[in-house]
Image (spheres, rainbow, N blue to C red):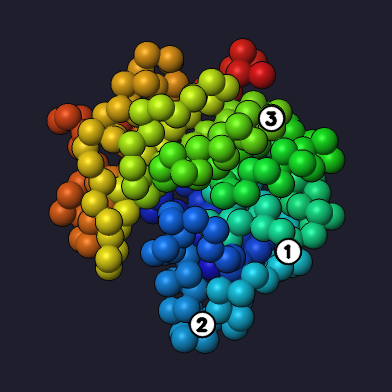
Amino acid sequence: MAVMNSHIEWTEATWNPTTGCTKVSEGCRHCYAETMAKRLKAMGQPRYQNGFKLTLHEDLVDLPLKWKKPRKVFVNSMSDLFHKDVPTDFIVRVFATMNAASQHTFQVLTKRPERVAEIAHLLNWTDNIWMGTSVEDMRVAGRVEHLRRVPAVVRFLSCEPLLGSLADLNLEGIHWVIVGGESGPGARPMDAKWARELRDKCLERGIAYFFKQWGGVQKHRTGRLLDDRTWDEIPSTLSTYA
């Protein structure tokens, strides 16, 4: 689970220099990473001997430098690089790897964009680093304000699980919106209206829109179609995104 080809529709691989996290909002209630970490610990997977407790994996920091084939890489699918207990110097080293591995596009997602904004001046924001934050409902809409302060060439939102209407969300400075319902046991339903509201806002503003899934207890049954089509838009890294 250090790195693997990914089944996540909007990326190609995952890289986890840290694992484990703590819950900060409603979107974390049914955390898939926590469930998976507990399962991997029970299976004896050595990187998950601490379960879902935050763990740094020093030997994985430079791993992407060994990959020759360019790929889109989701950074920390099993953690949050900007968790308060991840040392700043560790984050700087992870960024140095991403800077050097220029053949890849790194998609960094956090629920703690306030820390990203706070230390952004210490990091080298090369064009292959995309920065995103999770926004499940308007209660955490303030995360977008912090993200706007980050000088990433692409700033994106993961509205998954989408738990409420984001019709009033300000998308200024955002280049990509990913939308999806919650999946797995106890999944809370997503109203189709919420997904359409975001789609229409993106269409009006020229923002790439990616509809990942409807979710549900058995997500394979609900599929990915929204109004009879798939929405797989991914942003271009044009210099106009500065």
Above or below, comparing residue 139 to residue 187 in the picture: above
According to the picture, the residue beneath numbered tag 3 turns out to be 149
| Callout 3 amino acid | Arg
Q: Quadrant of the C terminus?
A: top right
Q: Earlier in the sequence, mark 3 or mark 1?
A: 1
How far separated are the C-alphas under marks 3 and 1?
Answer: 22 Å
| Callout 2 amino acid | Lys
Instruction: Determine whether, in the image, residue 165 is placed left or right of residue 80.
Output: left
Residue 199: percent from the left, percent from the top?
A: 32, 26
* Disc 2 + disc 1, Cβ < 8 Å: no
How far separated are the C-alphas under marks 2 and 1?
Answer: 21 Å
According to the picture, the residue beneath numbered tag 2 turns out to be 41
| Callout 1 amino acid | Asp
Residue 187: percent from the left, percent from the top?
A: 28, 60
Disc 2 secondary structure class: helix
Q: Nearer the viewer, residue 219 or 103?
A: 219
Disc 1 secondary structure class: loop
Q: Which mark is residue 153?
A: none
Give the residue furthest to the front.
Answer: 139
According to the picture, the residue beneath numbered tag 1 turns out to be 85
**Which is more foreground, mark 3 or mark 2?**
3
- Residue name at image x 22 percent, y 62 percent: 217
